[in-house]
Image: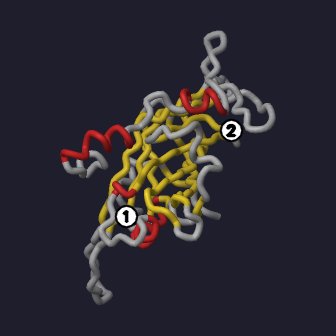
Amino acid sequence: MSVINHLPAVARADRAASLEPIRNPLKDMFKRSIAALALTAGCWWLAPVQYASAQAPQTVRVTVENINVQTQQTPAFSFRGPRDKRVRERDWLEVEVSVKVEKAPNPNDPLPMVGELEFRYFVLFSATNPATNQRYMATGTINHVNIRTGDTVNSVAYVPPDAMFRFSGGKDNYTQRDVEAVAVEVMHAGQLVGGDATAQRQAAWWRGTFPETTGFVRAKPDTPFAPLWYDYHLDVKPRN
């Protein structure tokens, strides 16, 4: 069930405001702190993202259309051979990002596809780490390959049950309500080409504001959900 529909009716309106994706990806937050979109002579490609030094103009743009945060129970599969083990299926956090990818016309590369995009996930939790007295923020990077342009496509990331227990402050009954905000950045050839966030705190709040905890945001092939919805989610670059 969705992050909004799962909430009691009384809390639904307030939570919808805090977890609804910002409708103009990066423009409001990054215009002041990083870069704005450039429009030139009938071309739409992005100006270089100015972190430190000038870079070549971008020819790819990614627009985030939706960020959906929900919990998903560990899937149960039927099998034969090994003796079964009694286990209670627990909940994973699922963060699904729907995007539209565009690229500038190029006669040398007419295929409507981008070879690779890097999705950087930032998941901020409401609970505070007692060791640092700061919020938990889990981060992870997923590399997608063979991305078609023009249509809406979907990236997905997961946080496993034991990590959710940790990041919720030790709750056995954690839910997506323990997530305060999610941000995603999309990179192409080392440059920022899109992104969005579910809550507008301050510009680029996921950069340098909270300590990052890595290793707990997983790509779908590293989870029990690997064989599910194959045609729905983007392909993940295999590890060498």
Please state which amino acid type lies under the numbered disc 2. Gln
Residue occupied by mark 2: 191
Please state which amino acid type lies under the numbered disc 1. Trp
Numbered circle sitting on residue 92: 1
Q: Quadrant of residue 165?
A: bottom left
Q: Are marks 1 and 2 in contact (CB under 8 Å)?
A: no
Find residue 33 and report its horizontal and vertical position in percent: 65, 32
**Disc 1 vs disc 2: which is toward the camera?**
1
Secondary element type, mark 2: strand
Q: Is residue 38 left or right of residue 182?
A: right
Q: Is residue 101 left or right of residue 69?
A: right
Rendered view: 203 above or below 46: below
The crowding category of the residue bearing disc 1, from other C-alpha atoms within 10 Å (few below 14, some 14 to 19, many at least 20), is many
Find residue 187 and report its horizontal and vertical position in percent: 62, 42
Quadrant of the frame with the C terminus: bottom right
The crowding category of the residue bearing disc 2, from other C-alpha atoms within 10 Å (few below 14, some 14 to 19, many at least 20), is some
Residue located farthest toward the left when viewing the structure as drawn: 9
Find residue 109 and report its horizontal and vertical position in percent: 64, 30
Rendered view: 217 above or below 184: below
Give the residue displayed 45% in from the left and 48% down from the top: 181
Find residue 229 and report its horizontal and vertical position in percent: 35, 54
